[in-house]
Image (cartoon, grey):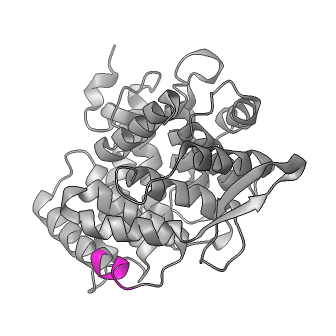
């Protein structure tokens, strides 16, 4: 595997496992304090929304996002209650992944959540889920005779850029399990994403951010035009849509964008999300797409990435 790609995989796994609680240069104390209060309100709301079966919204993908959000939350109040909620959610996801069918993007989200809970504890399910995910990979011909590779929602479905970005996450967090992928297959996946460029506009901000994040995960340089242009545009005016904000925050973290022209992105992302938070502490998805619980979880994950260690310790924002 290419060295840069291997390093990027390691970075992504660390972000997932540690809740992206790294340094957060450039976030002022007042914004950190607001972020901590907003995050606590959002988390408190999510804790009241879990169903009796352990899910949120009766949906595996939503439940996976909420589970990662809660496990990444720094030093939350009511630890015993949170732990019981997590145990119930993990049990629901284990039942779900063991009982196909499940769309590839939802399956990838579940694999991410189970890997975050502990790869050793869920190794067999992660391995079987990876095999099913790879069954949704489609080889296709790109212009100029290039080979592309993409994911479809189902083994017989059409290739889809959004599902491909999601599928990559499931691949990366199970990268040590069989069946393995070759460098050529990852190159074909990169070629497909390069060939499918969504406009950085309100209707496609989430896909644009997810595509940039995926290319960075595949080892593409932050200076590459396919990454640098969309990243700069999104970072200067961060979207309020939780899915777009989360993908953007992780992309900027992977690009190590705290210095140079993108400096200050952390505070801008947090402020955009604070403006979009609703009275009960939740967020809504753009254009009503996706569940409200899922949107709230993604907004909180974006804040966790952007605020970093300061979300746990606001005093670290002091000079």
Q: Where is residue 253? Give x, y as percent.
A: 49, 33
Residue 4 in the figure: left or right of residue 22 = right
Q: Where is residue 42? Give x, y as percent.
A: 38, 59
- In front of the other: 1 or 164: 1
Residue 184 sits in quarter = top right
Which residue is situated farthest in the right direction here? 144
Residue drawn at (41%, 76%), measured in percent from left and top?
Answer: 60
User: In the displayed structure, would residue 29 be above or below residue 164?
Assistant: above
Residue 278 in the figure: left or right of residue 222 = left
Q: Can residue 152 be seen? A: yes
Quadrant (top left/top right/bottom left/bottom right) for the C terminus: top left
Does 20 lie within the magenta span?
Answer: no
Residue drawn at (33%, 44%), measured in percent from left and top?
Answer: 19
Q: Which residues are magenta?
A: 94-99
User: In the displayed structure, would residue 30 be above or below residue 304?
Assistant: above
Residue 145 in the figure: left or right of residue 126 = right
Residue drawn at (61%, 74%), measured in percent from left and top?
Answer: 153
Q: Where is residue 165? Give x, y as percent.
A: 60, 55
Q: Can residue 280 be seen? A: no
């Amino acid at each position: 595997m290419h060295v840069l790609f291997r390093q990027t995989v390691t970075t992504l796994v660390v972000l997932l496992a540690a809740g992206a609680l790294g340094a957060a240069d450039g976030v002022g104390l007042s914004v950190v304090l607001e972020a901590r209060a907003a995050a606590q309100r959002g988390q408190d709301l999510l804790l009241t929304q879990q169903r009796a079966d352990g899910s949120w919204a009766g949906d595996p993908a939503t439940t996976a996002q909420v589970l990662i959000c809660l496990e990444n939350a720094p030093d939350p109040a009511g630890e015993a209650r949170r732990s019981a909620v997590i145990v119930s959610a993990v049990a629901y996801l284990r039942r779900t992944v063991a009982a196909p069918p499940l769309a590839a993007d939802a399956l990838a989200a579940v694999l991410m959540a189970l890997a975050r809970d502990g790869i050793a504890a869920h190794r067999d399910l992660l391995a079987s889920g990876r095999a099913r995910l790879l069954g949704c990979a489609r080889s296709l011909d790109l212009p100029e005779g290039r080979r592309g590779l993409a994911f479809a929602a189902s083994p017989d479905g059409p290739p889809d850029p959004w599902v491909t970005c999601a599928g990559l996450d499931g691949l990366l967090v199970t990268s040590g399990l069989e069946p393995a992928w070759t460098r050529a297959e990852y190159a074909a996946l990169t070629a497909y994403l390069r060939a499918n460029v969504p406009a950085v506009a309100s209707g496609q901000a989430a896909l644009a951010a997810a595509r940039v994040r995926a290319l960075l995960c595949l080892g593409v340089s932050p200076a590459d035009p396919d990454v640098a242009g969309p990243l700069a545009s999104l970072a200067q005016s961060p979207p309020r849509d939780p899915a777009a904000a989360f993908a953007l925050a992780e992309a900027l973290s992977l690009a190590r964008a705290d210095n140079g022209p993108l400096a200050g992105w952390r505070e801008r992302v947090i402020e955009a999300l604070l403006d979009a938070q609703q009275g009960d502490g939740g967020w809504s998805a753009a254009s009503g797409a996706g569940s409200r619980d899922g949107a709230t979880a993604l907004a909180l994950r974006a804040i966790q990435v952007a605020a970093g260690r300061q979300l746990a310790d606001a005093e670290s924002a002091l000079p």
